[in-house]
Amino acid sequence: MKNILKKIIGMGMSGVIALSTVFVVASIPTTVSAHGERSQEPFLRMRTVQWYDVTWSKATVAVNEQVVVKGKFRIAPDWPASAAKPDVAFLNISTPGPVFVRKKTLINGVSATNSMGLKLGQDYEWEVHLKARHPGRWHIHSMLNVKDAGPIVGPGKYIEVTGDYADFKNEVTTLTGETVDLEHYGIKQAVMWHSLWAVIGVAWLLYWLAKPIFFARYPVAMSEDGDSLITPTDKKVTAGFLVVALGLTFYGYMKAEADYPITLPLQAAMANVDPLPQSEEQVKIKTETATYRVPGRAMKATITITNNTGQAIKLGEFNTATVRFINPNVGIMDETAKGYPDYLLAQEGLTVENDRSIGPGETTTLSFIAQDAAWETERISSLIYDPDSHFGGLLFFYGADGTRYISNIHGSLIPKFI
């Protein structure tokens, strides 16, 4: 150990810095786990945005190819009072860095490049087109950013990107008809201007660092005679730096005006998007009781159902916090479940007591149990420790002809520890 210390000391300051850099780089993990959404409060994930019918068009794409992520979401009518309402919201995609480029975003067929206001209890259909940029295995989430409430993350899935980043191109045609590659557009000018200002900044620092900074000047400053520390030469140098800075700023402005005479400012207007046409909820739900049994990782709910659909129906799915609990007696009735992330799909997670068809016009009481390890792995069960232990979600009923009916469910969740 002594010999090692002697060698480190003998290396000098530059050697120590180099060695420290090696240790820092070596400590960086080579793999990064996903699922950061699990740290989000469960009441936000259960009672704000209900994501459903989410699909990813491809599981593997090459650099420059596109993948389409689309689906629907319902803005929960039981939006928590402690979270800001979605009066200003922006549909986004959560990725581990700029590994994709977003080419198009639509909500109900309307371009969603701007923020918009969303209405409680209403449904919206969305799709995002992503162009693969960096090779790797990336976790892709839908995400709705709500002003003052933060991001509300939807289900995520791994997408494999193959190929070489050097082949990536992001070409667009400007309003003036010019075709440019945004991946490299303006890089030379940015490097030139940053380098120029860095040189000026370093020169300014070196001028003052060349003077005695601390010990010689401190007593003078404390004696209230600090103005004497600024010499006539200092004032001239400062004036010179000011003239250079203002001159470069003016030159840069005039050059940009000459090179790019047609420009548009960043757009900050709100988009207006009408929700999907929605008829009155045909399956009425009233939550009577709801409990969560901690040892069994299971939620049991008793509800009163009124069937106004005109045909017999059965409960097929309970969807909450992007986790889908499926009733195997009804079966997975839609194609979206086939490509859904396994860790969010409880294929036999929903058990309906006295599982039978509910006739048209019938009002009955029904109990179901949603049980799966996802309550713990997705950290939804921590809801019972929140001051507002109120759950929310969607119930999917299916008619004999395969028609799906979606109803909201919410209520207080009481924990049971035995």
Image: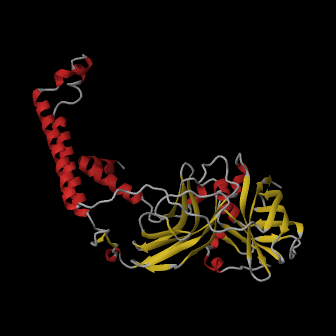
Q: Is residue 329 above or below residue 255?
A: below
Q: Is residue 90 visible?
A: yes
Residue 409 in the image, given as x and y percentages of width and height: 75, 61
Residue 319 in the image, given as x and y percentages of width and height: 70, 67
Q: Is residue 379 visible?
A: no
Image quadrant occupied by the C terminus: bottom right
Examine the image and state in which quarter residue 403 appears. bottom right
**For residue 305, side relative to residue 251 (left or right):** right
- Residue occupying the far bottom of the picture: 401
**For residue 75, side relative to residue 171 (left or right):** right
The structure's colour scheme is secondary structure
Q: Is residue 346 above or below residue 41?
A: below
Return the residue nearer the eye: 322 or 164: 322
Examine the image and state in which quarter residue 169 appears. bottom left
Return the residue nearer the eye: 130 or 17: 130
**For residue 231, side relative to residue 312 (left or right):** left
What residue is shown at x 71% (from left), y 45% (from top)?
A: 387
What residue is shown at x 64% (from left), y 54% (from top)?
A: 44
Residue 15 in the image, given as x and y percentages of width and height: 26, 51
Return the residue nearer the eye: 41 or 373: 41
Examine the image and state in which quarter residue 89 appears. bottom right
What residue is shown at x 29% (from left), y 54% (from top)?
A: 18
Residue 392 in the image, given as x and y percentages of width and height: 72, 58
Q: Is residue 202 above or below residue 285?
A: above
